[in-house]
Image (cartoon, helix red, strand yellow):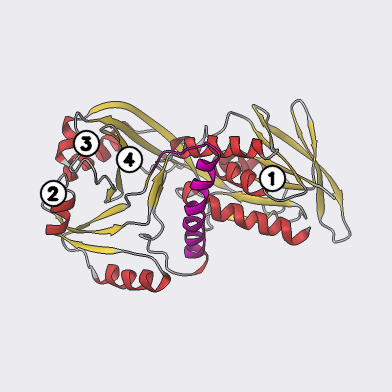
């Protein structure tokens, strides 16, 4: 017997869930979004997947990172096999180390990752200078190189997942906002969602997955414990140089002091991103001074960037859960068939595959 699933939200998380579920026989999947895909936090993400190089070593935080990295290793070839190539950089992430920084923690992490089957390299200043001569800062004393971490174009990946899901029979309704739910009580004093209503239509369902980022706050007001997800703003720049930084061939993501320099090819780079929290009044306003701080910080790390032409600046909001860890992947309290996959903060692209796998397991366990 087939089951119907309605996914609300089509950023990277919602699109990945749709694709994973589309491979389960007997599921009829509908995705709703109040705007076109990848328009909210996904469209304002750099796509830097800091998994192996993260300081998360155990528990849920590491398990999700590892699961996602493993899935990305198969997901990108899957998409390429059906003609959907997604721009990505497999040359790793280089995290700069600064004077006064204790390397003991990195050495311990290197040993842990080796035991887990992952690689980390600790570079001294001479190796860094040889491999990345564009880094010229007297405070930089070396680097940690993670060759198995990567960077992916989040918007291109989301659009590819939408196409792949459509080929597998998923139906998408964009510019269609979920407005209300229809419920019935079951024998366990939990409500069961029978349909999702939009401004123009009604979608019967056996499962609802809320993957709406900041929009999840309003959608969960039906629960005794609604979510409170707050916006955190990020700004970045897209710049272009006449020649690529350093070695034309070796172009890893370079990160230091929470500044990312992300190669895009053809001498272009993303530089970002700021982390700007709401005011006491709940407002989040992009501050140009903060963006300039990031830009000048990037130039201080790689002085050749001073010659770059700024092509574009952008900002976007990330969904950060209030007073609880990110992300939120669990049933909605009080409801038997509403699942949450939201509040990923700065790790939506990194954790999307692991999130989709968890949602898949929840649905399969009840089939």
Marks 4 and 1 sit apart, C-alpha to C-alpha, by: 34 Å
Q: Is residue 56 above or below residue 351?
A: below
State the SS at label 2: loop
Image position of 17 with respect to 177: above or below: below
Disc 4 + disc 1, Cβ < 8 Å: no
Of the numbered discs 4 and 3, the one sitting upstream in the chain is 3
- Mark 2 / mark 1, whichever is N-terminal: 2
Q: State the residue in front, 334 or 118.
A: 118
Residue wearing tag 1? 221
208 left or right of 278 in image: right
Q: Label 2: which residue?
A: 137
- Mark with earlier residue (4, 1): 1
Query: What are the residue bounds of the magenta stretch?
Result: 61-88
Between marks 4 and 3, how big is the CA–CA gap? 18 Å
In the image, what residue occupies the spot 34% across and 36% down?
Answer: 236
Q: Find residue 128 and report its horizontal and vertical position in percent.
A: 17, 55
Location of mark 4 (residue)? 272
- Left or right placement of residue 136 versus residue 32 in this view: left
Give the SS element for disc 3.
loop
Q: Label 2 to label 1, Cα distance in Å? A: 50 Å
Q: Earlier in the sequence, mark 3 or mark 2?
A: 2
Bin the neighbour count of mark 3 within 10 Å (Cα to Cα): few under 14, some 14-19, many 20 and up: many
Percent across and percent down for residue 164 are: 60, 38
Q: In the image, which is nearer the foreground, mark 2 or mark 1? A: 2
The answer to whether the residues at label 3 and label 2 have Cβ atoms under 8 Å apart is: no
Name the foreground residue: 39 vs 244: 244
């Amino acid at each position: 017997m087939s089951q119907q699933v309605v996914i609300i939200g089509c950023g990277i998380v919602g699109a990945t869930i749709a694709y994973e579920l589309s491979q389960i026989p007997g599921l009829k999947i509908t995705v709703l979004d109040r705007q076109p895909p990848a328009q909210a936090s996904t469209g304002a993400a750099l796509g830097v997947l800091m998994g192996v190089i993260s300081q998360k070593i155990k528990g849920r935080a590491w398990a999700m990172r590892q699961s996602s990295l493993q899935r990305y290793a198969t997901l990108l070839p899957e998409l390429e096999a059906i003609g959907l190539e997604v721009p990505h950089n497999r040359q790793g992430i280089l995290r700069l180390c600064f004077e006064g920084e204790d390397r003991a923690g990195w050495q311990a992490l290197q040993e842990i990752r080796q035991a887990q089957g992952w690689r980390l390299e600790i570079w001294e200043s001479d190796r860094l200078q040889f491999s990345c001569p564009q880094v010229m800062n007297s405070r930089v004393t070396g680097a940690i190189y993670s060759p198995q971490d990567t960077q992916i174009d989040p918007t291109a990946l989301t659009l590819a997942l939408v196409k792949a899901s459509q080929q597998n029979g998923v139906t998408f309704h964009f510019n269609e906002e979920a407005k209300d739910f229809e419920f019935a009580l079951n024998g366990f004093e939990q409500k069961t969602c029978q349909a999702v209503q939009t401004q123009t239509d009604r979608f019967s369902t056996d499962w609802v997955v809320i993957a709406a980022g900041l929009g999840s706050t309003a959608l969960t007001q039906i629960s005794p414990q609604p979510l409170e997800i707050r916006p955190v703003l990020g700004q970045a720049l897209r710049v272009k140089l006449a020649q690529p930084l350093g070695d034309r061939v070796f172009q890893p993501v370079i990160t230091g002091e929470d500044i990312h320099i992300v190669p895009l090819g053809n001498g272009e780079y993303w530089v970002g991103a700021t982390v700007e929290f709401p005011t006491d009044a709940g407002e989040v306003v992009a501050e140009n001074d903060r963006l300039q701080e990031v830009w000048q910080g990037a130039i201080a790390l790689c002085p050749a960037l001073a010659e770059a032409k700024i092509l574009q600046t952008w900002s976007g909001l990330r969904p950060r859960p209030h007073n609880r860890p990110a992300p939120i992947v669990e049933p909605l309290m009080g409801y038997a068939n509403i699942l949450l996959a939201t509040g990923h903060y700065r790790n939506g692209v990194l954790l999307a595959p692991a999130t989709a796998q968890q949602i898949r397991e929840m649905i399969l366990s009840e089939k």
